[in-house]
Amino acid sequence: MADAIAFDLATELITKLSSRALSQIGLWWNLKHDIGDLKRTVYAIKDVLLDAGEKSVTYEGLRLWVEQVTDALYDADDLLDDFSTEALRKDLMSGNKLTKEVRLFFSSSNQFAYSLKMGRKIKAIKARLASIGSEVQMYDLASRFSPVETSFMTKKWQQMHSFVCEDEIIGRDYDEVALLKLVIGFQRLGKTTLARLVYNDEMVKRHFELMMWVCVSDVFDVKAIVKTIIECVTYKPLDQNLDMDQLQKQLQDKIDGKKYLLVLDDVWNEDVQKWLSLKNLLMGGAKGSKIILTTRSMKVAKITSNCLPYVLKGLSDDDAWSLFKKIAFKEGYADSTNSAFVEMGKKMLENCAGVPLAIKTIGGMLSFKGTLIEWQSLLDRQFSRISLRENEILDSLGLSYNHLPSHLKLCFAYCRLYPKDHAIDVQTLVQFWIAQGFVKQSNPSQSLYEIGFGYFQDLVERSFFQEVGERYSGEGLTCKMHDLMHDLAIFVAKTNSIVVDSNFSAREVGGKCRHISVNPSLIPLIKGKRLRTLLHFPNKREESQHMSDETWDSIISNCIHLRVLKLDNLDINKVPRSIHKLKHLRYLDLSNNPKLKILPKGICKIQNLQALKLDWCSQLKELPKKIENLVNLTHLTCEQCHSLTHMPRGIGMLTSLQTLSGFVVDKDGSHGGADLSELRGLNNLRGQLRIKNLGFVKNAKEIFRAANLKEKQHLRSLVLVWSGDSDDDDKSLEDLQPHPNLESLLVIGWRGDAKFPSWISLLTNLVNISIWGPSKFKHLPSFAQLPCLQHLFILDLIELEYMDDNNPNGRQGDLESFFPLLKRLHIQNCPNMKVAFPCLSHLHIEDCPLTSMPLYPSLDELILVNTSSRPLKQTLKMNITSISPSTSTPSLPLSKLSSFHVQNIEELDTSMLDKWLQHLTNLQQLYLIDLPNLTSPPDEIRRLTNLQQLNIDGVPQLEERCEKDIGADWYKIAHIPEEHSIYYKKQRPSFQLRFVYLPKYSNKTKMMNNNILNTHINTNGDVNLLPLQKKMMMMPNVCPFVKLALENHRECLCG
């Protein structure tokens, strides 16, 4: 990869050497000729770097020459960055020319001495590069101005499909049937994919009571494996301090007498005793329990099982060709009917050994090549080197890497720093790339982030990333790297990027290492002083780390060239004032450090800073003054910084800002904070903007309009939080009109007049609307005509009567034009609401006296809490009376209902529920909560053959009747394939969680919801509001709503 680094550095250096800032410095310090000579030398070296990179594979001397060039260019880049920073510092100094010169002369770095020192450095680096460049003639290198790969195309973005999409799995039908034993196969034949296919099979799910999946990977830690197994069963995170005896007891309680399926994926352990230790703990399951184990090692197979392992082989020739053809010809550049293409494609397949990932990767690379010459060139030059041996399959995948443009090579290799199987946040990854200078401003009309995201798309298209999508709604795009791709990244990064996880690896960090991810406790051991990246990835299996003063001192004294510093979740309580010495820093992440209360003023001297992350620093009181000096800042995030009292004055001068997650209005003006008018010029803001304390704004009409929200065309989400106890009649929503491009709007606690702003009808791109009280709204406008609206949340509007200002009696007209796309409706604590809505897939009614309920032919999920049962009875009666011989069942009301949640409806008894369930034949999930008149499970449950899950809570009379195998009514629910959840809490804790509903989603999502919820509710029933809101609120596709009703926490919750 050294050639890619050198080429990219040379390109960047030429850009800097040609800049106005460097020209100005050359005049100031009499270095104009030296800078010109350096530029010509770098040009000469760059011309031959691409040829040198290819030839260095076979010439050791040339490889060493490329490494020398790379080191020298790194040093030159650091030097020029010093120059640029100094020029920026001079520009930012206030005062006239004479004042500036006096201040600079008497500054801590005397300018005359500084210019002499820098002059010597630039002459030295010029001489060093000239000496290295003079050796070019020894290697007969040709000038090249671009990589061989010239037909690289960028396609329109598409969301990738799931890792276990059955339609995309070719040639494994027999293997799936044959599985349910140990699976062995060499590198990445698809063992995990096949195991997942079996694990997710409906027949398999019905056969086992418990399903558990553990990714074991390199470290076979019995305690960690047992902990993960328990969490798979309980969907709850365990206390980190539990000892092995406690874990063993919990494991036995969970699996004792139950038939389970356990998958141990990617096992490397060859220690018999470790395996036996785990095996003994798993002996309590019922007869028929199974363990699937996947491994690359035959030795692992022998020590873990006496049964004959299932050896997964490469795809057959026919299946390999089917997969290759599907990918290589999908873009239509090459003709799949042309025999010449077919012949060359099959020759290339001979070198892939049937490995699906290798086939997919090479096919993806060829899909962008449309001529026989391009295919033949690749076949002649590269595939002749590839061996069929197992340990050289990486060579096949490496072909795609070799044919990437240099900037994409750097971006991919950088991902070596992530742990295996890590869910990579795409936005953060792109920001890393930008901070390192990998992303080039090739198109002035695009932001650097947009260009960098295009790089990510290019890598996805070539299969360098997989599992691309939102893990949880609202949490942003994530991706993963296949294990083999991660191995490839390690291989190509070599010593340039290292993961430091032991004393030994810390001492291995040398002068050539530029990027590390590290356990913070090891930082003082690191001797390398040229680091550009220092990342910390919190390990959930380890105790939380603490950032010591010694560690800070080590970073600031030894890592002065850092561009990226990620120190989240490290219990940091202060940041040293000397942090300003990290003048090259572009990215600083201090998030999730709740003890951090104040930031040093020195941060504002880091004028190259592009991203400052402070999310979840819940005790942080203020941002530093002079923030306007951070002229390059593009991302400032402070989500859930609930102690922030105001925003610093001058923030409006940061016109490059693209992310400003929150703006806190100074409540009483005592902090001298910025007012909303400073938002006027921040028209590049993207993503979400949350404005807090709007109820305290003085001269609201003028200030609101000065915020200029309607010009912020890139904003996608706007949250308006009012707070305060007084009425807001003088603070009209009308003056906070956003741009029509807005997709999500949340208004919390506005106490003004009952009139909603007229601009709502202009927001035709809105997908989500949430209106939370307390509020005086008696009616809401006709959201029904918003063509894109999919999610509507209405909460605590106690005076609300109806939602269509033209028809207080409700509207039941043309269903196609009334909420045409609405999928999810949540109405809670609106006691005067008189109308419901058609055309939904999800309906949630809570604490509302619903008086009528229209037909819901498409309703998939229905939640009724503390409301009347009459409308539903009427609907179902219509259902019964409307049946005729010619009627098709799928067209009947509620006929598509798959999930039904009913809670605290006093008049509901067994007989009534029996009638309700009679026609809900597609029901898959049933939740019966707090129903005192329910004396037994309804008989109709026996006929619900699609029912997968039954949850009963708060119905103590059913506990004995539904006891497994011996209860009087067990026969009614025994057919439910998934383990049913029937439990009764004799004394419920009185925490202020009014209602949490976990609807029908994947097991992974259910587990996520349960883990989040239970993590933040202690044994006394107290709710830890801050982290709970982070995960659960504003995630309508994952959890419909978590209502925390404690009013004196409203500000904390919503802020």
Image (spheres, helix red, strand yellow):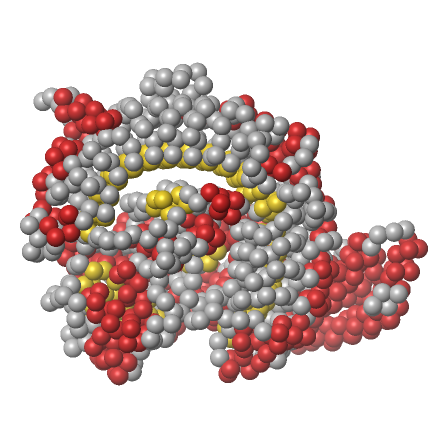
Q: Quadrant of residue 195?
A: bottom left
Residue 309 visible from this viewpoint: yes
**Split into 4 quadrants, where in the image is the N terminus?**
bottom right
User: From this viewpoint, which residue is outermost toward the right?
Assistant: 98
Q: How many marks?
A: 0
Q: Is residue 286 left or right of residue 744?
A: left
Looking at the picture, tell me which residue is in the foreground, 151 or 779. 779
Residue 887 visible from this viewpoint: no
Q: Residue placed at 58% from the left, 34% from the top?
A: 726
Q: Tell me where residue 758 appears, x and y as whole percent.
A: 54, 23
Q: Is residue 2 above or below residue 837?
A: below
Q: Tell me where residue 787 appears, x and y as whole percent.
A: 43, 27
Q: Residue placed at 34% from the left, 17% from the top?
A: 813
Q: Is residue 818 left or right of residue 37?
A: left
Looking at the picture, tell me which residue is in the foreground, 582 or 353. 582
Q: Tell me where residue 161 appears, x and y as whole percent.
A: 36, 49
Q: Quadrant of residue 220?
A: bottom left
Q: Is residue 165 above or below residue 273?
A: above
Looking at the picture, tell me which residue is in the foreground, 42 or 429. 429
Q: Quadrant of residue 757?
A: top right
Looking at the picture, tell me which residue is in the foreground, 501 or 1043. 1043
Q: Residue placed at 41% from the left, 48% from the top?
A: 1032
Q: Tell me where residue 673 appears, x and y as whole percent.
A: 70, 46
Q: Is residue 631 left or right of residue 490?
A: right
Q: Residue placed at 26% from the left, 39% from the top?
A: 904
